Image (cartoon, rainbow, N blue to C red):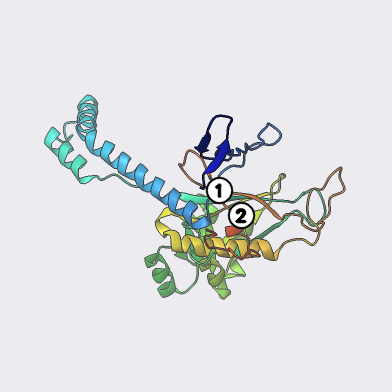
Amino acid sequence: MSNVIRYTAQKLVLCRPAAPATLHFQSYVTRAHPSPLPTAPIQDALQRLISEMDERHLHRSQRWENNKDKRVNQRSTYLTARGRPTHPSEEGVRKEAAEKEYRRMDESLEVALQLNLDPRKPGQALRGSFSLPHGNGKKFGVAVFTDNMELAKEALANGAVVAGGASLIEDIKNGHVSLTSFQRTLASPEMMSQLSSIARLLDQLLETLEQQQSGISNYRTDKEGIVRIGIGRGSFGVDKLMDNMRELMNEIQSIKPESFGKGKKGKGGSAKGTKYYLKAHLSTTQSKGSVLVDLRTIDPTSSFFMSDPL
């Protein structure tokens, strides 16, 4: 910064120029124009939620260990009050409590995707089903109908709740097998004609083995145009959840209606520049809130799709 020479009536004065004024801009924030909420890229949002799950698990496991003596005393007092002569001693109760570990809950992750749709208008009420690459983590009880006893034994060994042929159908008719014990049914081709007698009891369509194993997820828009769907469990990890999220967004993009948008004064229509995606929130089963996702990272038409824009 160069010096400036100023002449006065008495003497020559050497001084520095005045510093330039600093401009301060203040954002315009009112109730009608609130400050924008912070968003996170999809990968960071998933990682944040998984980290919160790990913190909850660590806190609860520590509390489980700290309250071990309290649980032993409560259990011993309860068994003593029952007055049964064969109740275990305090040492037995303490040994039983030491063998029990804290059971971690594998929380589900759900995305709430708000679309610029008005379900009251024709063609804007979306619903359908698709397969997630890694499933949604839900486990269903499966009943297998087959006359092949070897196949029935193999199905039971692989996790089926019940398996059998005509005898299983009779047990369901008589109420010996509860319909609440299974949620999905598989049937071999020769059993399809015999299942007509309990079709009303089952109250669902029979699915083939390939459809059952694919892990089909159903979705539909509510009256506000929001799609809520689970994308997996916390134990999946970020990579598998990213794959499921990518498949979900590609599915939502593929069924995008030609005309969408709520419009103004009831006119609606998808004018140039109308947004299809409005908001996206990620949450878990026990999270206190949700994470607002950066739409650029989940929009299949964006150059930042499934990546970090920074």
Contact? badges 2 and 1 (CB < 8 Å)? yes
Q: Earlier in the sequence, mark 2 or mark 1?
A: 1
User: Tag 1, which secondary structure?
Assistant: loop
Question: In the rendered view, would you say 51 is above or below 306?
Answer: above
Q: Which mark is residue 188?
A: none
For the residues labelled 2 and 1, the Cα–Cα distance comes to 9 Å
- Depth check: 60 or 276 in front? 276
Total label count? Answer: 2
**Along the horizontal axis of the image, is 4 left or right of 127?**
left
Which residue is painted at 25% across and 45% down in the image?
A: 101
Give the residue type that dot 2 points to: Leu
Is 68 left, or right, of 131 in this rendering?
left
Q: Nearer the viewer, residue 264 or 21?
A: 21
User: Horizontal placement of 256 versus 2: left or right?
Assistant: right
Q: Please report the residue visible at 45 percent of the width from the left and 64 percent of the height from the top.
A: 163
Camera-side residue of 88 and 216: 216
Residue 59 shown left or right of residue 17 in the figure: left
Residue 39's mark? 1
Which residue carries the number 2 mark? Answer: 295
